[in-house]
Amino acid sequence: MQFRDLKTQYTVLKDEMDKAILDVVASGAFVMGPKIKEMETAFAEYVEAKHCVACNSGTDALLLALKAWDVKEGDAVFVPSFTFFASAEVIAMQGATPVFVDVDRDTFNICVADLERKIEQTLKAGKLKPRVIIAVDLFGLPADFKAIRKIAEKYNLYVLEDGAQGFGGRIGEQKACTFGDISTTSFFPAKPVGCYGDGGAVFTDNAEWAALIESYHIHGKGSDRYDNVRIGMNSRMDSIQAAVLLVKLKAFAEHELEDINKVSARYTEKLKDIVKTPIVPEGFYSSWAQYTLQVENKEVRNGLQAALKALDIPTAIYYPIPMHRQTAFNYLNINDNLCPVSDQLADTVISLPIHPYLTEKDQDMICEAVCNYLTK
């Protein structure tokens, strides 16, 4: 059994995928070829954003957004503690200071009450200038952007949507990757739409920022690749990855997103009376990058993981160490009780296999194993 079954997905998409890859190979246009613009146009149209810039990873996408806003030393960027390291790493890479915010126990996303509290504390301390809120669409569920936007407007902050796991999610009819002033996503293979390597994209409706990001992601280029007008980076997407993504976007839109929601609904129906299952607020729609349970404590979590492993059922822990406890951020001298919910989740979450090709037979096996262990 696969945690995220990319092999079965390839088998289903094989004919289209092989042709798409071989067409790029035959063209010889491996870097910045016509497939890049085709991919950018398709993804911009899917999320209904005016601009999409393809880049080398979801991490680079976040970094490019911060560069477009000239985030730098002395700036404070507010970011959830319960997330992947890249969400906070890019802040430090720009010389700015990450301010860690706790998350909501039910949605795993940034807690708006703690967000405003941390902004007020930062202003009162007077050492840093609040600039940006990074809101992560964790596990496929969009953050509460209506509430986040109100806070951003109150304090005159930019909103950066980290949609690395959120592509395909929605609030009402509005799609993820359009909620931020700039939004980003990742195309790491295990993401809702993944390529066959690393890849990412930046989305915005602001033409000026899009132009800056276009420049920054190709060595700060100006009118051509030998006219360098700013210090940039090498974050181009390969043409083969763009071709892969075009095939996968079609499958995602036609059936994969709907199919993975059927899997999650079936999981919830079978497990909701046994364990705390994921909560999707009314009006929200998740793309289910992960299906994450919350158990009583770390001992129960470790026992459940071992029991499932004995049955060859893979699981994962996202995330065992919150950002405010990462060694890399020791220089910030963070208060030990900074994000208590994040600390608790780090000890109690466990993610089950989920993907559009998970059979009902395997779903039943997984649910039976979870129930057997937790009710014994």
Image: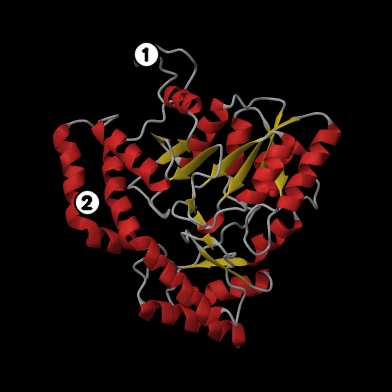
**Which of 301/271 is in front?**
271
Q: Which residue is mark 1?
A: 223
Residue 152 picture location, percent across and down: 68, 40
Using the image, determine if residue 58 lies above or below residue 251. Answer: above
Choose top left, top right, bottom left or bottom right for residue 358: bottom left
Residue 335 at x, y percent in the picture: 81, 46
- At horizontal 43% and vertical 22% (from top left) the residue drawn is 215
Res 75 seen here: yes
Outermost residue, front side: 173
Three-letter amino acid code of the residue under disc 2:
Met
Answer yes or no: do the residues labelled 1 and 2 have beta carbons within 8 Å?
no
Residue at disc 2, secondary structure = helix
Q: Is residue 248 left or right of residue 306?
A: left
Q: Which residue is mark 2?
A: 17
The amino acid type of the residue labelled 1 equals Ser
Question: As displayed, is residue 255 above or below residue 373?
Answer: above
Q: Is residue 74 above or below residue 120?
A: above
Please state the horizontal and vertical placement of residue 85, each as a whole percent of the image: 58, 45
| Image quarter of the C terminus | bottom right
129 left or right, relative to 359: right
Furthest toward the bottom, the residue is 376
Point out the image quarter for the N terminus.
bottom left
- Distance Cα–Cα, label 1 vs label 2: 34 Å
Q: What's the mark number on residue 336?
A: none
Instruction: Left or right? Give the position of 229 relative to 40.
Output: right
The foreground one among 153 and 288 is 153
The residue most toward the right is 124
Q: Nearer the viewer, mark 1 or mark 2?
A: 1
Viewer can see residue 81: no
